[in-house]
Image: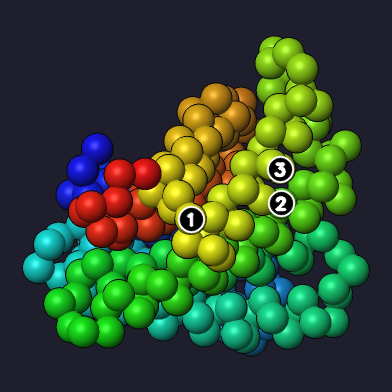
Amino acid sequence: MNNNTYLAVGKLFFAVAILTIGIIHLVTGHFPSGLLFVDPKFPAASILAYINGVLLVIIGLLIFSKKYQYTGAYIASVIWFILLLIVHLPKLITTYNSPSEWTPTFEVAGIFAGSLILIGNSSVKTNSSRLILIGSYIFAVSIFVFAVLHLKYLDFIVTLIPAWLPFRLFWAYVVMVAFFAASISLFFRVLVRLSTSLLALMFFIWFCILHIPRVIASPHTETEWTSMFVVLIFSGIALLIAGSQPNNVKV
């Protein structure tokens, strides 16, 4: 694929996922518990959830359009940075021994990184390449954290792999190695297009064979819907990074 194809598909995945996560806010009336846990007892938590949901829907629609893509990505970066700073980092600091907070914290960090990369790809300003690079490094940190979590909680990861798939422990190791390899590739800027293309493909395969069946089996479970579109947005971010590489880069 050429850069334009990478960027177009990555943008599509990103916009669809952002818009859908916004709809999840509006349908449930609360922040998605697996991604943006906000205590329902927090003052005006429900109102804030509806506001955030509307904003995410608007952002998704803006990113769909070529004319307002930069504006949508910019607003997205502000929102996800605020959520990372106010919702997740304070909780992670106080509950750093709990894996249940590491995952959503770095999912939000990854989405923030994707917003920066999309800004960089939507702007002709001289600092656009710097934004893409910063976003890529933040995304690499998120992927590295996921790799460590997979290593530490490998037995649990095995239980998430579909029962019909043989050699589930093997595939759990494959995913862990893929995370480590992609993060190292991004940190050291080696074979970035190849590593992020494969990472995007892996996330999309999860979307198809793991998350869609889980949503079909539990259509009223918010966490399943949220997880499915988090995976899609990460696939999109990986494609955006792949498409941000210079045209003379073949892999």
From this view, report whether residue 233 is shown above or below residue 43: above
| Mark 3, secondary structure of its residue | helix
- Label 3 and label 1: CA atoms lie apart by 19 Å
Question: What secondary structure is found at the residue carrying circle 2?
Answer: helix
Q: Position of residue 193 (x, y in %)?
A: 39, 49
Q: How many marks?
A: 3
Residue tagged 2:
147
Residue highlighted by disc 3: 176
Which residue shows up at 56% across the image and 50% down it? Answer: 182
Determine the image quadrant of residue 143: bottom right
The answer to whether residue 25 is visible is no
Q: Residue at x 52, y 84 (%)?
A: 82
Check disc 1: other Cα within 10 Å, few if <14, some if 14-19, many if 20+.
few
Amino acid type, mark 1: Val
Which residue type does callout 3 highlight?
Answer: Met
Up-down relation of residue 78 to residue 25 (above or below): below
Q: The N terminus appears in which quarter of the rendering?
A: top left
In the image: residue 198, left or right of residue 251: right
- Residue at 90% over, 69% down: 97
Q: Is residue 215 left or right of residue 96?
A: left
In the rendered view, does 232 fall on the left or right side of 40? left
Viewer-closest of 222 and 171: 171
Find the distance from the CA under tag 2 to the CA under tag 3: 5 Å
Distance from the alpha carbon under mark 1 to that under mark 2? 18 Å
- Any mark on residue 190, and which? 1
Is residue 79 something that shows in the picture? Answer: yes
Eye-nearest disc, 3 or 1? 1
First-in-chain label (3 vs 1): 3
